[in-house]
Image (cartoon, coloured by chain):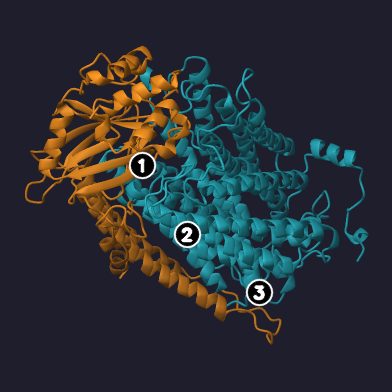
Amino acid sequence: MVAALLSWATLPTFADARDGFFGPTNIFAPDSTPAHSIFRLSIFELEVEGAIFVVVFSLLAYAITKFRQRKNDDDSEPPQVYGSNQMELAWTVLPVLIVVVLFLTTAQVIHRVQDARRPPGTIEVTVVAHQFWWEFRYPQYGFVASNELHVPLSAPQLPTPTFLALQSADVDHSFWVPRLAGKTDLIPNHPNTMWIDPQETGLFLGQCSQYCGVQHAKMLQRVYVQSREEFNKWVHAQQQPAASDPAVASGSALFITKACFACHTVRGTIAAGIVGPDLTHLMSRDTIGSGAVPLTPENLRQWVHNPASFKPGSLMPAPDITEQELDQITAYLLTLR
Amino acid sequence: MASESIALRVHKSPLHVVYECVATADHKKIGLMYIVYALLFLVVMGIEAILMRIQLSHANATFLSPEVFNRLFTLHGTTGVFFVAMPILFGFGNYLVPLMIGARDMAFPRLNAFSFWMTAFGGFFLYASFFAGGGLSQAGSAPDVGWFAYAPLTSPTFSPGHSTDYWTLSLLLAGVGSIGAAVNFIATILCMRCPGMTLSRMPLLAWMNLVMGGLILVTISPLTAAQLMLMADRYIGGHFFDTAAGGSVVMWMHFFWIFGHPEVYVLIIPCFGFVSEIVPVFSRKAMFGYPAMVAASVSIGFVSLGVWAHHMFTVGMPSYGNAFFVLTTMVVAVPTGIKIFNWLATIWGGKIRFATPMLFCIGFLFQFLIAGLTGIMLATAPFDWQLSASYFVVAHFHYVIVGGILFTIFAAFYYWYPKITGRMLNETLGKWHFWIFLIGFHLTFDFMHIPGLLGMPRRVYTYEAGRGWETWNMISSIGAIFQAAGILIFVYNMIVSYFHGALAGNDPWDAWTLEWATTSPPPDYNFAGVPAVRSRRPLWDIKHPDDPDWKYE
């Protein structure tokens, strides 16, 4: 019954990520095997607990209604009962049985999700969490992307799951895209793994869910699930070195002289910083600041001018530059497609 | 009905009162100081909660900066656990346990005073960080590392200045106080019982304080050790939690949660004691299954020591490790179920009087049932991978702490206030308090589960629109206003009733345990003669000489 209710309330509404009353990060609208396994387990558990709740709630409600003191009662005390071993035994054994069933069901799901093997065709991505953004390394393809994770669709007949190796560059973080999988923490010097095999294309949202400092709230996640062809196209584009446009030479020079390169990488130039996000294909992304604001020319200019205006506590300092230099750097960044 | 008729209420100069507070080693005065101190911090943490609820009531709010918000949730959590819940329970335990077991005082009165003052300094020290936390060169600031302060956020790299040191030292101080109090409870309960009061005749509240004391000894020690390690890391080049030098941040989590989970039971087990005293009296029946209740509580205490890593299902333990902690955690449900059924059986067949203490206990029974069920969901590791660190968890533990612990503490106030002051709390105001607070509680915390299910993580100072979270957060924030109103009525009731409440007499509830055999408030020496008991309900035996309990036990 609970399953029917929840699926009626949530599932059909969530074909599109942004639609619906329950929003795009509903754990009851799974789209990937780990999330599905959790969903089924949670429905089973909700049904068992729903039954327990109804029984105990009714007993309590009945008792407090039935056994209240009446106006015309005499002052005598009710019969004193001190206990009953049979009843104690009954309400010990029954919960034990329920616990055994719940535990065995749970252990099965833990094993299925955590100990899953990698089929051939698995995509490997190393996720490195930073205060307050995400780095995605694709060792099979030899490039690094930032903040927006792209993965291919995994078809049931030819599964191509994505396995994520989780690392942290600084403090604890947690990877949580509810419709794809449960969360797993990214902890310094404690590598973790998780996997997803999305069944539908589209954008899936999430965010860091382990408190990591001032801007924990705006360490957002965007996972783009693409068809195999689209994904290959994206990979190919990401593998290219940065565009080099002589029209924005002044901007690219400022990128070096104003020390932007100390933190950021632009492949194909001398900029090879690893503290901030890779900007080689900045303009292929939809957002800046790890999902803080949409990537538009105006927002980009404002971001470079003062990152704290969108994301107070961001570790990127506001550079000491004139308005004209700001325009030049922005123009340069806008060419990094 | 003049106030002079209340025993021992004599007029004293303020200076004299201060002197008495500082110098006293009397368990009743120390108990009251714990309670007043905790109520002060309850108001402080409530204000912090209200500020956070204003900020979260709508998307993209700018009422608070992220820095301030992070300090507020750190202080709200730390204050609530260490400087509200624990001291208030120590306070009631201090006041009631010696009276209930027929003793003159606690076993170690001066250790008792020392423990209180350590705890008190801990709380004041934490709040001093507002002025001094940034160190000499900067403006002050309070800790902002969260109440479980995961490494390496607490390392000098990520937490410069002294705010984290204030957090560490205040918990170190409070921890010493808690250990002192635990030793005292255990010694008092084991050694100071009056003639005839065997362990199997002891009131359940005393039993619960015994279990609490044992748990504190085992669990506060690792917390204190962890604080010392953190201090060593920060100041003398220790590398316990420094991953760059081979330390482990996961070790901090283990240290913290081997304290942190049993701590929940440290808090709720004495509350089980309140319920087990109040429900029988207002149902007019003996506690059903007393030995089972004791056994269940003791086994909850033991099992709770083996469940800590269910707070760590997402940190990447191996599958069999996760499965182990699923099993141990689910096992807790069995003795907890036994307790709920025994309370139910106590009510069954009784003549329930719906006075305010009983109302709060009935609220507790329903809410604790729900908190237990959501607890089992969180114990299910895969489900927890979704729910952990989300607003679902926040809703769950507030259901335990507010719906469970705070409701029973209110019940305890209404029940024992007459004993402590000699005057009744106003029943009409009490019922207003109950209903308004009940509405507020359910508005805030029932609806808080939902954004968690919809992907909202905890500890975010704001969220973007369009994630489906706004409505639920707005409802939660509105509930907070009701809760605040309830608390105001409660405080008003306590103040007004202190001066104008109806006189209580020795035994206003027609109750059965020893504290009701002495005057209200009790004299310094508690009992004029050493009481002797023959059953679990000595006053029942006196009131029903033809049908005493000792014939049946």
- Horizontal side of residue A241 vs B124, given as left or right: left
Is residue B39 visible from the viewing direction of this image? yes
Q: Is residue A54 left or right of residue A66?
A: left
For mark 1, name the chain. A
Mark 2 and mark 1: Cα distance apart in space: 21 Å
Tint of chain B: cyan
Question: For this view, does B463 lie left or right of residue B176?
Answer: left
Give me the chain letter of mark 3: B
In the rendered image, which quarter contains the N terminus of chain B?
Answer: bottom right
| Residue in the picture at 28% in, 56% down | A29
Q: Quadrant of residue A2?
A: bottom left
On what subunit does the disc labeled 2 rest? B
Residue visible at 39% across and 52% down in the picture: B466
**C-beta proximity under 8 Å, tags 2 and 1:** no
Q: Which chain is orange?
A: A
Q: Which residue is mark 2?
A: B447
Front residue of A134 and B459: A134
**Label 2: how many residues lie within 10 Å, few (<14), some (14-19) or many (20+)?**
many
- Across and down, in percent, residue B470 comes to 45, 54
Relative to the observer, which residue lies in front, A288 or A209?
A: A288
Identity, as a three-letter code, of the amino acid under mark 2: Phe
In this figure, which residue is indicated by the disc labeled 1?
A207
Please state the horizontal and vertical placement of residue B326, each as a whole percent of the image: 34, 49
Q: Is residue A57 placed above or below B31 in the rendered structure?
A: below
Which of the two discs, 3 and 2, labels the residue nearer the N terminus? 3
Amino acid type at circle 3 is: Arg
- Give the quarter of the image for residue B423: bottom right
Of the numbered discs in the image, which one, if any, rests on residue B163?
Answer: none
Instruction: State yes or no: discs 3 and 1 in contact (Cβ < 8 Å).
Output: no
Relative depth, front residue between B286 and B546: B286
Residue depicted at 29% across the width and 67% down the height? A8
Task: Kindly identify which residue carries mark 3.
Answer: B353
